[in-house]
Amino acid sequence: MEKTLVFIKPDGVERGLVGTVLNRFEQRGIKVERLELKQLTETEVDAHYQEHLERDFYPNLKRYIMSGPIVVMVLAADNVIAIVRKMVGVTNSAEAEPGTIRGDYALTTQNNIIHASDSVESAEREIANFFNY
């Protein structure tokens, strides 16, 4: 069974969308293996977004991700990474299809409600970063 890391970003938590998002995953038969409400530290944010550290947008992204708690989870199912990525929708919320999580709930490209691992390698690294697997 494949695993992936997903987190609901501060805007999703603040807007009370955690249950709505979880319900979508559970309705698809995806198992929630771990779930935790966390206020990320600077070190955790830098580790998660290491590929963006030098990008111009990173300071704003970091400030946003640290602006409130996130709900981070490990999801499991066959082919879960591809399934979850399709359910989440594209990163740019303006281009996200209606019926996807971002298409239905994202406010802006940055405040796009959710993060989901994009590959097996990313999922393994991100799960280890957040849950010390």
Image (spheres, helix red, strand yellow):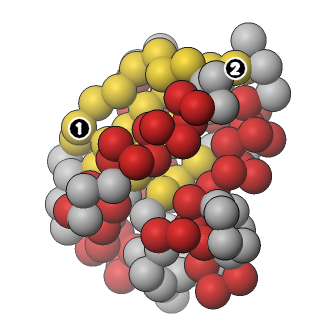
In this rendered view, identify the residue nearer to me: 63 or 103: 103
Q: Amino acid at mark 1?
A: Leu
Q: Amino acid at mark 2?
A: Ala
Q: In the displayed structure, does residue 112 sit left or right of residue 118?
A: left
Q: Is residue 11 left or right of residue 48?
A: left
Mark 2 neighbour class, 10 Å CA radius: few under 14, some 14 to 19, many 20 or more: some
Tell me the SS state at disc 2.
Answer: strand
Viewport quadrant of the N terminus? top right
Check the image and report above or below for 24 versus 92. above
> Where is 28 relative to 10, above or below?
above
The label number, if any, that marks residue 37 in the structure image: 1
State the residue in front, 29 or 39: 29
x 44%, y 38%: residue: 22
The residue beneath circle 2 is: 77
- Point 61% across, 25% down: residue: 30
Residue 23 showing in the rendered view: yes
Percent x, y of residue 101? 56, 60
State the CA–CA distance, disc 1 to disc 2.
22 Å
The image quadrant of residue 13 is bottom left
* Circles 1 and 2: CB atoms closer than 8 Å: no
Using the image, tell me which numbered label, if any, was put on residue 125: none
Choose the circle earlier in sequence order: 1 or 2. 1
The residue located at (46%, 37%) in the rendering is 23
Q: Is residue 82 above or below residue 62?
A: above
Badge nearest the viewer, 1 or 2: 2
